[in-house]
Image (cartoon, helix red, strand yellow):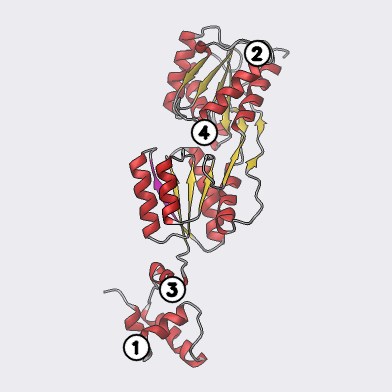
Amino acid sequence: MSITIKDVAKQANVSVATVSRILNNLPGYSDETQQRVKKVIEELGYQPNAVARGLINRKTKTIGVLVPNVSDLFASEVLAGIEEQAHEFGYSVMICKTNHDGKRTINYLQALYEKRVDGIIIVSEFITLDYYKTIETNKVPVVLVATESEYPLPFIKVDDYQAAYDATTYLVKKGHADIGMIAGTESDVISTTPRIEGFKDALNNVGITVTKEMITFGDFSFKSGIEGMKNLLKNYPKVRAVFCASDEMAVGALSLLYKKGISVPEEISIIGYDNTATAEKAIPPLTTVAQPLYKMGKDSIQLLLNPTLKINQRYPHHIAERDTVRAYSE
């Protein structure tokens, strides 16, 4: 049977209210009483209930995180930063996998509110009107990571348009003209649309006309990278360089090319997006657009707990050069 606050109060010969005040560092008791209660707590092995304590001080020291998929390396990098900073501040983290399911997301938002979390971080999700209404109704602080919203919610992300523009320009400067793109989810206006626009504008600005055969869609996953590379080889057979909208898709493309005996970068160059751990582990190591995922996760905790903190919402990116892009001058 678990030890309750009533057991502590009875053993220490004080009221439940006194034990509660001591646990929450509130005044109204002597030093002698405090020492006696703490000794009983230690002897009985009492573990205060965080939610019950939160009813008094309005803090549960818990943060909820909504993420579409916890298994991919993109999410892992962000979550690592979130958990590290939360731990440093004395907070625990509840991770909820939404799977891009609207009903599940609403249910999680409501459940986290009922558990009295001190704030919610939403990673890489499109914020619908229903999500926003739930957030507004519950009055729980929310910060977005790797996404943004038309609604007034604080966010942290890179400029996807500029990053895609820079990645495509990088390929052009290496001497490439026949460039394809494996884009993300077609309906994703937050990440996919600006990356496609950056890709198109970078090519249009150097006089290369972008046709529909040059772009195929996936869902940012490894498997969709394989399928995307198949589609490009079929529909755009002269392709000699590919910009992938995630490292996972880029590694999928590398896998498909390896199985077909097409060498990278000698025959086809590949550039990814994210600079997750998979980019360094790929064979050959993947050139990619680096965004500071771990730092974005850490800073989201700071922004959540201190909304007046001046954190730059648009984070810098750069090209992490490795071995999957050939320069024709070489």
Q: Residues within 10 Å of mark 1 (few under 14, many from 20)?
A: some
Residue at image mark 3: 56
Comparing labels 4 and 1, the label whose residue is closer to the camera: 4
Rounded to the nearest whole Å, what is the CA distance between mark 3 and mark 2?
A: 63 Å
Query: What mark, if any, has residue 11 been given in the picture?
Result: 1
Residue at (51% x, 53% y) in the render: 83
Q: Amino acid at mark 1?
A: Gln
**Type of residue at label 3?**
Ile
Q: Quadrant of the N terminus?
A: bottom left
Magenta-highlighted stretch: main secondary structure? strand
| x and y, in percent, of residue 242 in the image | 56, 18
Q: Amino acid at mark 4?
A: Ile
Mark 3 or mark 4, which is nearer the start of the sequence? 3
Element assignment for label 1: helix
Label 4 to label 1: alpha-carbon separation: 58 Å
Give whichever of discs 2 and 4 has the lower sequence position: 2
Q: Which span of residues is magenta-colored?
A: 93-98
Above or below: residue 263 compared with residue 5: above
- Residue 176: mark: 2
Q: Gap between marks 3 and 1, in whole Å?
A: 23 Å
Q: What percent of the width, then of the height, locates residue 159? A: 62, 34
> Distance of mark 4 from mark 3, alpha carbons?
40 Å
Q: Secondary structure at mark 2?
A: loop
Between tags 2 and 4, which lies in front?
4
Q: Using the image, tell me which numbered label, if any, was put on residue 190.
A: 4
Q: Is residue 64 left or right of residue 316?
A: left
